Amino acid sequence: MSLTDVLFQPFQLGNLALRNRIVMAPMTRNFSPGNVPGDDVVEYYRRRAAGGTALIITEGTCIDHIAASGYPDVPYFHGEERLNAWQRVADAVHAEGGKIAPQLWHVGGMRKAGVMPEGDVPGHAPSGMNMPGKVNRHVMTQQDIDAVIDSFARAAAAAESIGFDAVELHGAHGYLVDQFFWEGTNQRTDAYGGSMDKRGRFAVEIVEAVRAAVSADFPVILRFSQWKQQDFSARLAPTPQALEQFLAPLSAAGVDIFHCSTRRFWEPEFEGSDLNLAGWTRKLTGKPTITVGSVGLNADFIPEPGETSFRAAEPASLEELLRRMDAGEFDLVAVGRALLANPDWAVLVREGRLQEMQAFLKDDLASLA
């Protein structure tokens, strides 16, 4: 039995039945003019499903809140035309034997006023801060909070109604949900700020609302991270005890799978243990976890100084990934840049054709190949 076989065991949770343990990581691509996924987006995801990827998690797609978007040409997940387009994506993935979940997204304070089509609408943030200590965004009111929670729930219900297999809530990387998690950008003095439990309340209420809006066996995934795009060294939970305090309310609220975003999957999360963030999350919650972070590549994605695009990287050994997975550290593996360069990454791994793997080049971001 090959060690790679551990990647190709089936996985099932609720109605989500996967043919293997390989997930496409969500990656913003800015190729949806009018915020509508087009034929090229349909084909982009179809190719990865045809290449053996079991679960596609889409790029971030914005919920129906006026300040949810912060970037040009990102897809939205509301409105008849956009949802019809997303249904075509889901149908194409299903036709190739894959499953698919939209990543529901609100950028929060990362939005700058002027981004179209919303124009002068400012970014919304828990304390009006995109960066710690700098108040230059709209401070969210209780009405704003309630509206965003309702928007996430509507989007999740729409996802189930048009045939998606699960939904992922974007709670990572310094966007809105994570801005509530992070003490650096959450200086509120009401029920949504202060202690870790209070800073997590916004996300808990989103999860509860989503859980109530979809079927009991429709999986809800939450992506979270210690690091922020505003501060790569930031840590929500510096100890296992703090991580458990952070995760327990989210797990109880109804998160089915935790997607644990790290830059390098092989790095231990805490001193004294080899477990990475996904490993610790699985241990503390008992819930399935997805690991992610430069899988199959020899360098993380952080841009070189003075650059903004993902870093180029060469194919790398999967031995450490497979060792950890074989030990039961995590349940699923999300692949990002390597899957952009190799739409058939799963097939190449399964068939032992690693020498055919292509390097990830920055030019791979120039199209939806």
Image (cartoon, rainbow, N blue to C red):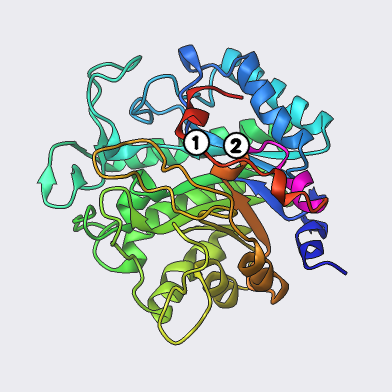
Relative image position of residue 163 (x, y in whole percent): 74, 32
User: Is most of the magenta stretch helix, strand or loop?
Assistant: helix
Of all residues, the one furthest to the front in this rendering is 355
Q: Quadrant of residue 156?
A: top right
Residue type for callout 1: Leu
Residue 361, label in figure: 1
Relative image position of residue 1 (x, y in whole percent): 88, 69
Q: What residue is shown with label 2?
A: 341
Local packing at callout 2 (Cα closer than 10 Å; few below 14, some 14-19, many 20+) is many
Q: Which residue is rendered at x = 32% and y = 38% of the image?
A: 108
Disc 2 on helix, strand or loop?
A: helix
Q: How many marks?
A: 2
Q: Which residue is rendered at x = 67% and y = 72% of the image?
A: 323
> Image check: 10 left or right of 122?
right
Q: Earlier in the sequence, mark 2 or mark 1?
A: 2
User: Is residue 291 magenta-colored?
Assistant: no
Please report contact status of discs 2 and 1: CB closer than 8 Å, yes or no: yes
Q: Which residue is rendered at x = 78% and y = 34% of the image?
A: 50
Residue type for callout 2: Ala
Question: In this view of the protein, can residue 82 be seen by the observer?
Answer: yes
Magenta stretch: give its range: 340-350
